[in-house]
Amino acid sequence: MPQRRSHVAPSASQSELAAALAALRAGIESPVEFSPEALAEAESTTPEVPDLDLREVPFVTLDPAGSKDLDQAMHLSRAGSGYQVRYAIADVPGFVRAGGALDAEARQRGQTLYLADGNIPLHPKVLSEGRASLLADQERPALVWTFVLDSAGAVTDFRLERALVRSRAQLDYVAAQELLDAGQEGPLSLLGEIGGLRQQQEQQRGGASLNLPDEEVVQKPDGSYDIERRSPLPIEDWNAQLSLMTGMAAAELMIGAKVGVLRTMPQPDDQAFSRFRRQTEALGRPWKDGRYGDYLRGLDKNDPMTLPVLEAAASLFRGAGYVTFDGTVPAGDLEQAAIGAPYAHATAPLRRLVDRWSLAICEAVSQGRPAPEWARESLPQLPDLMQQSAQRASTLNAETIDRVEAALLHPLVGKSIEATVIELRGESRAAVQIAEPAVTASAPVRAGTAPGDTVTLKLTSVDVAKGEVQFAA
């Protein structure tokens, strides 16, 4: 599934789009500006200098090109027949004072919101893109996870401790992948080896990854907009495995201490599995036996039917939430089903509220101290705060893409367009993928249409302000 990009050049529809996106930003039910008190805290509060000095360890960061809010840095090395992974996380618990103005505003926001023309950060940018970010050639306090892995990639030991670090380089996915593909030695030379072993560990656990193409609205310097859709690079999957490994370690620590917050997701029920089997059969790529994670891993990325299959599989990855506990670990299944193990969010504190609690609790537990009282007192509030922010983020993302797609299609009103059916929605409607411009839409289809079919649609109307498009079969 190669990268695809659709372009909205400056035009009348572009002007409508700019107004529509501005209205969308204005209507967000979340604070946009920070109070003077919160800004003052972000500019002045400084964590205690850690006793452990790891500035000589050559950490590097790996993120999308141009990122400034750098949550993680890594250092990979061999250790006997296995490996050592150091994973440094921005020390947000040290920068945000519990009960302060900055803490209060972060709780209102829940997470960084990403828009077509920028973002609404969880923390002031002086902190999230400056003082706390693990920027290259800057000394930073960090929460450093140290993992010892055996030759099969299984974790045999780990710890978490505060340390002073200095990243040597800010790497981006595309350039780093090109270096690895060329066989050049570098700080990430072991990432494919370790990431591949962790993927095998995931398979043995019964975990499953849903690698849907990323869909992102990008504003260009000339004021035009792009929608970029691309499949994750292998290096992104390997990097994600380090984050998953860290989240599982965090869950283990908190469960052992009987205090914390987990990210959970139930196993799909029989009805969901049956529906997915029928969909794969209709697409000509039947899931006959075995675990659904193994089936998804075996899909050919170059097969045009893979995208419709992955879209259908999204129904298996639903129901995620958070569960908190203090003193007694909840009864029942605490696994995040897609990961195949208990799991916690603990690697993105600059952009996600709940990670600050996980990290503060895990650092205390790892060092033999009780969990911080501020974290224990506020644990019950976290699930609602995160659910509200997730709903805002999901709605904002969907409505942004709807408006940009409407602007993309605006010049084609009255014309016929070919599209591929991704998923049927009832007897007479379907989700369809248009190749050029690259737009996913809902459209009427004739009886007997099946997923994977190519259909011809007539674009009858477009409303950029509302993000609505209408087709006729």
Image: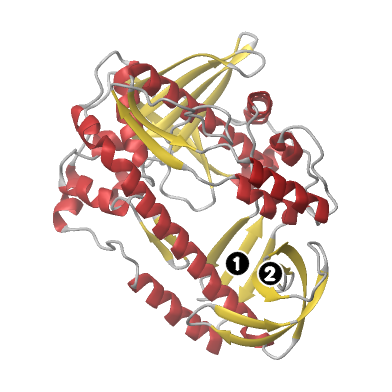
- Residue neighbourhood size for the residue with mark 2, other residues' Cα within 10 Å, grouped as few (<14), some (14–19), many (≥20): many
- Residue neighbourhood size for the residue with mark 1, other residues' Cα within 10 Å, grouped as few (<14), some (14–19), many (≥20): many
Q: Looking at the picture, which amino acid does disc 2 mark? A: Ala
In the image, residue 113 lies at what x, y percent? Answer: 40, 57
Residue 227 disc label: 1
**Quick one: SS at disc 1?**
strand
Quarter assignment of residue 430 = bottom right
Q: Residue at x 23, y 37 (%)?
A: 378
Upstream in sequence: badge 2 or badge 1 = 1
Q: Residue at x 72, y 33 (%)?
A: 291
Between 267 and 437, the one lying in front of the other is 267
Q: Residue at x 30, y 54 (%)?
A: 109
Distance CA(mark 2)–CA(mark 1): 8 Å
Quarter assignment of residue 449 = bottom right
Q: Is residue 26 left or right of residue 295?
A: left
Between 101 and 219, the one lying in front of the other is 101
Residues under numbered marks 2 and 1 in contact, where contact means CB atoms less than 8 Å apart: yes
Q: Is residue 236 left or right of residue 53?
A: right
Quadrant in the picture for the N terminus: bottom right
In the image, residue 255 lies at what x, y percent? Answer: 39, 21
Between 166 and 93, the one lying in front of the other is 93
Q: Looking at the picture, which amino acid does disc 1 mark? A: Ile
Q: Is residue 193 above or below residue 315?
A: above
